Amino acid sequence: MTRQQVLDLYFLDARSKLIEVAAFLDRVDRADGGVDFRLAAFRQAMRHLADGAPRRAEKVLLALSDPTNEPVAKAPGKGAIGAWPNRVKS
Amino acid sequence: MRFIEPHAHMVSRTTDDYAALVTAGCAAVCEPAFWAGFDRGSAAGFHDYFHQLTDFEPQRAAKFGLPHFCWLCLNPKEAEDLRLAKDVLALIPQFLDRPTVLGIGEIGLNKNSRNELAILERHIELAARHDQLILVHTPHLEDKLKGTRLTIDALRNQPRIRPERVIIDHVEEHTVKLVLDAGFWAGMTLYPTSKCTPARAVDILDVCGTERLWMNSACDWGESVPLNIPRTALEMRRRGWSAAAIDRVIYQNPVQFLSQCPKFRLPPD
């Protein structure tokens, strides 16, 4: 596909999702509350969108991933959160 | 259009979904054993579930002329209870000779715990001992990268496992190359909000090629779309893929992998 064709096919959809992200961040700012590792991880991952380098989807996923290699002693429940709590501290 | 749905939890779906799948061109559906949304209290619950997968569900699908196959295991979400896990592992061999059982799956990791890893290794050993195909679930969201690495290590540690007989499912942009470069097959799961969207799945095909890759809806009791394979085929058409290239991904690739099990046979066209 040419760049023109990609834009014709996906621009409006991506524009909509970009505004959703912007509105989400505004919504979070308007709400009361303290620091949350998910928001910090989200802001760190967003940096890859604007750095002009390729493989952005992969880098965003890596930024939200547990990078360690050792199994944990016990499963802390069943569900996943979407960001790794220790990423921002490390 | 024809396609194989290689990963769908039909016990959680309505009969309408069978009708919709067949209407859209589905030629076979394959159902891995999974978590019911709650922890089963005993191995007897799994015994009944394996009967459902190997007996009742193929009959339900047959009413629509749809071949139904399955995979058997204990899902990693229930692997923290080692006693239960070992009891279920002991049950599985009696079902492996049933005519629609393709192999061991979907095994894997959920929160990457030691007990989950121990039970994953037991499943891998069981598959090796019975020369079964393997279907692997990789963890969700932040746990996927680590879980994929641990799973690949566990598979490599069992010398009787041949990578071409293992599919590692739910890959995304950050794990697909780990899986393919290690010689395994990779599955892309088409979900509305997690895993891959249709557009991202086609991106992965554009970047990685079509060898040793398949797609599935993994539809279950959660938010999921049983027709996401044909919808992704539509996405491919919009992006200029030929009908033959689409058929390669959504039909021939799964047939190629699954045919390594002699029980996977489709009725003639």
Image (tube, coloured by chain):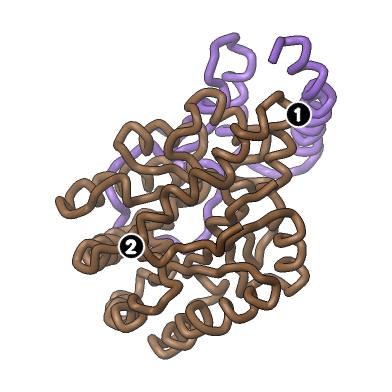
Residue at the disc numbered 2: B116
Residue B225 visible in this rendered orientation of the protein: no
In the rendering, at what x and y percent does residue B136 appear?
40, 55
Amino acid on which disc 1 is placed: Arg
Residue at image coords 45%, 86%: B41
Give the SS element for disc 1: helix
B225 in relation to B236, above or below: below
B90 in relation to B203, above or below: below
Residue at far left of view = B159
Q: Which mark is residue B238?
A: 1
Label 1: few (<14), some or many (≥20) within 10 Å? Answer: few
Chain under numbered label 2: B
Query: Which hue is chain B drawn in?
Result: brown
In the rendering, at what x and y percent does residue B261 appear?
36, 61
Nearer-the-camera pick, B221 or B25: B25
Query: Which hue is chain A drawn in?
Result: purple
In the rendering, at what x and y percent does residue B247 appear?
60, 40
Residue at image coords 36%, 69%: B79
A57 in relation to A75, above or below: above
Report the Cα–Cα distance between label 2 and label 1.
Answer: 41 Å
The quadrant holding residue B180 is top left
Give the SS element for disc 2: helix
Q: Earlier in the sequence, mark 2 or mark 1?
A: 2
Amino acid on which disc 2 is placed: Glu
Nearer-the-camera pick, B196 or B11: B11
Marks 2 and 1 share the same chain: yes
